Amino acid sequence: QLQLVESGGDLVQPGGSLRLSCAASGFTLDYYNIGWFRQAPGKEREGVLCISTTGGRINSLDSVKGRFTISRDNAKNTVYLQMNSLKPEDTAIYYCAARRSNYGFGCTVRWYGVWGQGTQVTVSS
């Protein structure tokens, strides 16, 4: 069974940092593009950062450029989201998702078929 499990969400003060992890089981991430998405209350789910199989291509939401980075360790079957300089507007449930690389690269929510259960990130003083 293909499964993604996120971890690392927490309550953090504005300006703080968090690192989220997305661990895959039941399949290898080598052949999948991976995306981090988020959904705030009352808002649609949006793509935050997406990375290709080798890490050579990355798509980023404008509002997180320079603050968030995505990386992957295929040997550990894990993808990471490093979030720095967090703002209250970053508060959301963060999900990771996988898309077979042969289907193309992008950060569109509906393109991704394997999803984790999400992890809550709250930025508040």
Image (tube, rainbow, N blue to C red):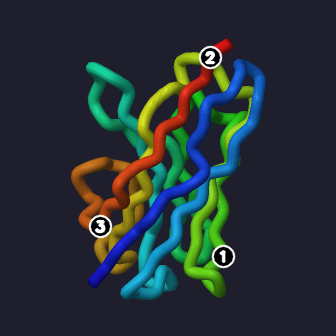
Q: Position of residue 80 (x, y in %)?
A: 63, 59
Q: Is residue 122 above or below residue 4?
A: above
Which is more foreground, mark 1 or mark 2?
2
Instruction: Assess whether mark 2 and mark 3 are in contact (beta carbons under 8 angstroms).
Output: no
Q: Is residue 66 visible?
A: no
* Residue of label 2: 124
- Residue nearest the viewer, comparing 103 with 110: 110
| Mark 3 residue type | Val
Q: Residues within 10 Å of mark 2 (few under 14, many from 20)?
A: some
Indicate the quadrant where residue 92 lies. Answer: top left
* Residue of label 1: 73
N-term-proximal mark, 1 vs 2: 1
Indicate the quadrant where residue 33 lies. Answer: bottom left
- SS at circle 3: strand
Q: Residue at x 52, y 71 (%)?
A: 23
| Mark 2 residue type | Ser
